[in-house]
């Protein structure tokens, strides 16, 4: 096995509220990585200090201009961080990161929110076919050609 | 102090105004509600959105948290050792895009420190007789190990040697 020259660069990105809280619960999994966190509230930097934190503007699919603004911010972030891996718990900023990270050949993981218990979220469905992996937090939602289940944050 | 949160975006007037009516009936003035885009209550103190640091400070001061059935607020409140009363938003009543909060509430129901209410009268009862505080350390701040191991493995596979 060839020796590794550097730690993996990970971009962990989510919108606010429950998405951000679920993402933080993955923190021990990033222990060996060079991680950059991104979310929509400037005050969230304190949640992950002393790790690097970058604020990106939030958006949702109903406001096209905001989507473009977020996409540009996420693209700029990706170009600076050059992640090997992008991990997101949604929603819109994470989905945009997954779509754009393809340009950089990063591997991407979309972990759908535990709140989506009856069907995968709209964002998770949009991530299918773009993300390297889409995971649901509910075993009954796992499908052969759909999201897979690897556990939940709760 | 009772901290009410329905997030910072969608209105949830059914919850906010049920708490408001209860506070008026009981003469309680120690209530702070974060109401997002909703219609302001008449009696209780309210704010549309608290910055995260301010929210954490208010949460630390709270004796009871009343909230919509959001995963974020549930983890935050219980993780902070606060008793929590939740009311799921109903898509049927135009309170959200779909019924996922009902599913979240079903998943959380039965946790110590938490009570799920479906309507204003159940909520008034829960406010009169709030649940006991959740046991300390009930929620560690990390996801369970199987998920962490899977994420670690995913990251390892992604690194060029």
Image (cartoon, rainbow, N blue to C red):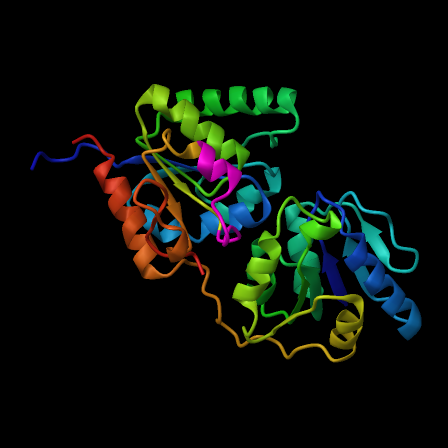
Seen from the viewer's position, the closer of residues A149 and B35 is: A149
Residue A58 falls in image quadrant: top right
Tell me if residue B104 comes above or below residue A90 in the rendering: below
The residue that appears at 51% across and 50% down in the rendered structure is A116
Residue at 78% x, 43% y is: B37
The main secondary structure of the magenta stretch is loop
Q: Is residue A116 magenta?
A: yes
Q: A142 or B53: which is nearer to us?
A: A142
State whether residue A52 is above or below residue B41: above
Residues in magenta? A114-126
Quadrant of the image occupied by residue A3: top left
Query: From this viewpoint, is residue B104 visible?
Result: yes
Q: Residue at x 56, y 56 (%)?
A: B71
Percent across and percent down for residue A89 are: 46, 43
Q: What x and y, as percent, mark residue B124?
A: 80, 72
Image quarter where the N terminus of chain B lies is bottom right
Which of A127 and A70 lies nearest the eye of the viewer? A127
Measured as percent of width and height from the top left, residue A44 is found at: 57, 43
Where is residue A117 drawn, in percent x and y? Answer: 49, 54
Residue B50 lies in magenta, yes or no?
no
């Amino acid at each position: 096995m060839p020796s590794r020259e550097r730690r993996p660069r990970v971009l962990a990105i989510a919108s606010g509220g429950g998405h951000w809280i679920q993402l933080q619960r993955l923190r021990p999994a990033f222990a060996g990585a060079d991680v950059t966190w991104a979310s929509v509230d400037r005050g969230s930097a304190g949640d992950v200090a002393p790790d690097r934190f970058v604020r990106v503007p939030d958006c949702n699919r109903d406001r096209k201009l905001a989507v473009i603004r977020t996409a540009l911010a996420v693209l700029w972030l990706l170009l600076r961080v050059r992640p090997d891996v992008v991990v997101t718990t949604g929603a819109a900023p994470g989905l945009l990161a997954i779509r754009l990270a393809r340009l950089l050949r990063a591997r991407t993981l979309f972990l759908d929110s535990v709140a989506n218990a009856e069907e995968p979220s709209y964002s998770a469905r949009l991530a299918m076919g773009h993300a390297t992996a889409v995971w649901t937090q509910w075993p009954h939602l796992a499908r052969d050609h759909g999201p897979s289940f690897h556990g939940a944050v709760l | 102090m009772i901290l009410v949160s329905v997030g910072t975006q969608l209105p949830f007037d059914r919850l906010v105004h049920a708490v408001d009516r209860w506070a008026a009936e009981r003469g309680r003035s120690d209530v702070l509600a974060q109401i997002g885009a909703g219609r302001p209550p008449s009696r209780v103190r309210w704010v549309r959105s608290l910055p995260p640091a301010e929210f954490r400070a208010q949460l630390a001061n709270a004796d009871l948290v009343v909230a919509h059935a959001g995963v974020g607020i549930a983890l935050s409140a219980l993780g902070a050792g606060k008793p929590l009363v939740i009311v799921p938003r109903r898509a049927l009543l135009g309170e959200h895009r779909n019924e996922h909060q009902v599913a979240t509430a079903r998943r959380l129901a039965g946790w110590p420190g938490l009570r799920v209410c479906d309507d204003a009268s159940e909520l008034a009862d829960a406010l009169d007789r709030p649940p006991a505080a959740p046991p300390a350390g009930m929620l560690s701040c990390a996801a369970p190990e199987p998920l962490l191991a899977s994420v670690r493995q995913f990251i390892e596979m992604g690194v060029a040697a």
